[in-house]
Amino acid sequence: MRSDDPASNPYATPSPLSVESGENVSFVGTDDDLRPFRTIWTSPRRTVRQIVSINPKLHVVLLACLAGVGETLDRASTRNAGDDLPLAAILGIAILIGPLAGLFSLWIGSHLVRFSGSWIGGVASREHIKTAIAWASVPSIAALPLWIPQIVLFGSDLFTQETPGLEAQPMLLIPFLAFALVELVLGVWAFVLLCNTIAEVQGFRSAWRGFGNLILAGAVVVVPLLGLVLVVAMLSNA
């Protein structure tokens, strides 16, 4: 098979399927040079528009699973899971449980975004919202390989409150901060993409409305929890 054959390229967007029903279907943004793993970084709206038009399920499960691994590692680091668990256990949990957590996060997130987005005129189906969420996570997934050199250099210090390895070798602080900065940039980039992809599938002209949709989705969870906490606090003080 020729190397330039699109069928041999796993990163190529699939060609539109032929329509046998006779319906006039228009595929928007199906430029031949568009490759979603590349174009999502700088053209998120155009990219997700094409994916939704051709195959909304394209790599969604894979992306959600990989994003779940990264999120699990991030949580383990921020919550100092290494104070209670060995490094091998943390990595095992990330690899085995992380994908399931990513799929659940995608499932609940798509429900919340669709529900709250309908309040401000959003029109996307849950399937299209899942596409938008999954593909916006590409920058965060790109940070996954960075964990390998970090684990080699810093070991369990990545997941503990105290960092004896870094304290013993202060020069390691430079690459430690460099990795943290790169991950921060990629995380912010992923959020910006998410605002744009949500706006696109919801039919919003502005990415700011996509941002508002995400805020509302978070509020659907946070506000009732805060109300419950206040009620419990008032009852306990009564």
Image: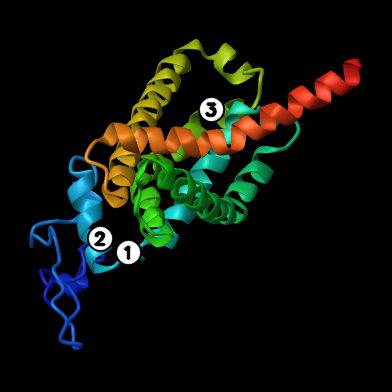
Q: Type of residue at label 3?
A: Phe
Question: Where is residue 159 shown, x and y percent of the image?
Answer: 62, 29
Residue occupying the far left of the picture? 32
Q: Nearer the viewer, mark 3 or mark 1?
A: 1
Q: Residues within 10 Å of mark 1 (few under 14, many from 20)?
A: some
Mark toward the start of the polypeptide (2 vs 1): 2
Image height of 101 relative to 183, above or below: below
Question: Is residue 179 visible to us here?
Answer: yes
Q: Quarter of the image for the N terminus: give it.
A: bottom left
Q: Which residue is mark 3?
A: 154
Say what secondary structure mark 1 lies in.
Answer: loop
Looking at the image, residue 221 lies above or below residue 123: above
Residue at x 42% of width, y 18% of height: 177
Which mark identifies residue 56? 1
Q: Kindly identify the residue that appears in the image at 41 percent across and 55 percent down.
A: 130
Task: Give the SS element for disc 3.
Answer: helix
| Mark in the foreground, 3 or 2 | 2
Spatial distance from mark 3 to mark 2, Cα to Cα? 39 Å
Q: Which residue is mark 2?
A: 51
For label 3, the crowd category at 10 Å Cα-Cα, with few meaning under 14, some 14 to 19 and many 20 or more, is some
**Quadrant location, the C terminus:** top right
Secondary structure beneath dot 2 equals: helix
Three-letter code for the amino acid on which mark 2 is drawn:
Ile
Q: What is the distance, in whole Å, between disc 3 and disc 1 at their CAs?
A: 39 Å
User: Mark 2 packing: few (<14 Cα in 10 Å), some, or many (20+)?
Assistant: many
Residue 149 shows up from this direction = no
